[in-house]
Amino acid sequence: MKKFILILFFTSSIGFSQSQTFEVNPANGKDTINKIDSDGKKQGKWILFGRHKPGTCYAPEAKVEEGKYQDNRKAGIWVEFFCNGNMRNKLTFTNGRPDGYAIMYHENGKISEEGNWKNNRWVGNYKLYYDNGQVQHEFAFNTSGKREGAQKYFYDNGQLAIEGNFAAGKETGLIKEYYENGDIKAEKNFADGNVDVASIKEYQPKKPLVAKSDVPAENAPKVIVKPDEKPNEAVKKGAGPMVLNGQQTLYNKNKQITKDGVFKDNRFMDGKAYIYDDNGILTRIAVYKGGIYVGDTQVEN
């Protein structure tokens, strides 16, 4: 389940050090937002601007995020923005943690993923999108965060790639695979996540396939290494950019693991991506195969 990205992804409160900035109503000169009560707790509506995050790509007056606090905890809808002004995500918070409907966006303004987040996992219906706007995955999760029921994968041209059913997070029954032109590619029967090899049926395409070289590169899904992600030794030494290939474990500037798996020319191909909020709390572990996000593995509370 996702841009996971991500994509992304979930944010917690962005704190101030010693100073605080208020927005003043010119009619009466009173503070209107970014209030801190007598107990030092944030209350009511808050808007964080670029000036609150010096050294970033945000212009001083550009919005970074906005929403409401209740007793120093995020509550209700919070919206975060990219540096170009486009929305980054819109999350529902309860007691300071994401809980409820969540929608994330690519920097170009198109939806990245959406669904319901509860207890550090996706529940119910979930969709992941390519940055061209096409749906990449349609998953359904049970209350434990495991895939349950009908599941679908799509190519970036909108064509169905795989369809079948899951039970308690494992493939079950007939799984069908398709070529990018829509022709049936294979049929496989599963039980408890294991394929019955004798049941596999494979088919040749009836219509010509478009060569991969003919597919625009910008439509190919990519999970690229971020500038602040480096192998552990590089983090210690402060090494600059590098090209990663093969098995690698990457860490962020806080020395938290961010990706663990196989890379090809800095593209993350196979393995796990660890996503944290702004407080360094692990919120998701996304699984990638062949450079494509295929779902989440459970985060231990």
Image (cartoon, rainbow, N blue to C red):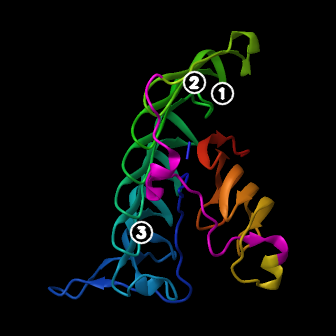
Badge 1 vs badge 2, beta-carbon distance below 8 Å: yes
Given the image, on which type of amino acid does mark 2 rest?
Glu
Residue drawn at (67%, 57%), measured in percent from left and top? 268
Kindly give the residue lying farthest to the front in the view shown. 208
Kindly give the residue lying farthest to the top in the view shown. 199
* Disc on res. 148: 2
Where is the N terminus found, in terms of image quarters?
Answer: top right
| Residue 243 placement: quadrant | bottom right
Residue 118: give x, y in percent of width and height.
54, 42
Badge 1 crowding class, 10 Å Cα cut-off, few under 14, some 14 to 19, many 20 or more, is many
Range of residues picked out in magenta:
206-233
Residue 208 included in the magenta stretch of the image? yes
Magenta stretch secondary structure, dominant: loop
Badge 3 vs badge 2, beta-carbon distance below 8 Å: no
Q: Is residue 229 left or right of residue 218?
A: right
* Disc on res. 43: 3
Q: Earlier along the polypeptide chain: callout 3 or callout 2?
A: 3
* Residue bearing the label numbered 1: 169
**Quick one: SS at disc 1?**
loop
Given the image, on which type of amino acid does mark 1 rest?
Gly
Given the image, on which type of amino acid does mark 3 rest?
Gln
Residue in front for this viewpoint, 81 or 45 = 81
Q: Earlier along the polypeptide chain: callout 1 or callout 3?
A: 3
Residue in front for this viewpoint, 26 or 190 = 190
Residue 233: give x, y in percent of width and height.
85, 75
